[in-house]
Image (cartoon, helix red, strand yellow):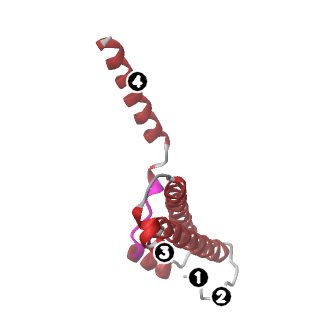
């Protein structure tokens, strides 16, 4: 019995390492200040493509955060049981759920903004004349 549990732990640990290794290493976005400086300094098409790629990485990161916040909000929404706050202060009982929903919305907006900026830099890389709003 002891060997079975040990084997399961080793197998699960190995599977977790394989999943972590399968994901690209660039899922963590650049620092915002560095990315902004990189965007302002971009002059060549290659530099604009590199900036666009970083903004797309940032958008994927924000999208993952949004999904995580939505899942947490759904968990809190479906949580049942007695909660004294529901009876005493009903408007305060859903505070954490509403906060998670708000954070998900903010992350989705940030992802859209990042994708807009990536599109701007892809347009600049292709020789297009994009308005100066998307740095």
> Of the residues tagged 4 and 3, which is closer to the observer?
3
> Of the residues tagged 3 and 2, which is closer to the observer?
3
> Of the residues tagged 3 and 1, which is closer to the observer?
3
Mark 2–mark 1 CB contact (< 8 Å): yes
Q: CA distance from mark 3 to mark 1?
A: 40 Å
State the residue position of label 3: 91
Badge number at residue 131: 2
Q: Nearer the viewer, residue 17 or 84?
A: 84
State the residue position of label 4: 11
Residue at the far bottom: name it.
132
Q: CA distance from mark 4 to mark 3?
A: 46 Å
Q: Dot 3: within a 10 Å radius of its alpha carbon, few (fewer than 14), some, or many (20 or more) residues?
A: few
* Magenta part of the chain: 26-32
Quadrant of the snapshot with the N terminus? top left
At x 52%, y 57%, the residue is 64
**Picture coordinates of residue 68, whole percent (x, y):** 50, 56
- First in sequence: mark 3 or mark 2? 3
Residue at the far left: name it.
2
State the residue position of label 1: 134
Q: Nearer the viewer, residue 125 or 118?
A: 118
Q: CA distance from mark 4 to mark 1?
A: 47 Å
- 134 sits to left or right of 33: right
């Amino acid at each position: 019995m002891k060997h079975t549990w040990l084997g399961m732990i080793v197998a699960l640990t190995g599977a977790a390492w394989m999943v972590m290794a399968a994901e690209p290493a660039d899922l963590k976005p650049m620092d915002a200040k560095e990315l902004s400086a990189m965007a302002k300094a971009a002059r060549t098409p290659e530099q604009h493509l590199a900036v666009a790629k970083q903004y797309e990485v940032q958008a994927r990161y924000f999208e993952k955060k949004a999904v995580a916040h939505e899942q947490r909000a759904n968990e809190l929404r479906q949580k049942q049981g007695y909660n004294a706050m529901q009876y005493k202060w009903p408007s305060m009982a859903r505070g954490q759920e509403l906060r998670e929903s708000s954070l998900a919305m903010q992350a989705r907006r940030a992802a859209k903004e990042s994708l807009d900026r990536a599109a701007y830099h892809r347009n600049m890389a292709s020789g297009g004349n994009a308005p100066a709003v998307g740095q």
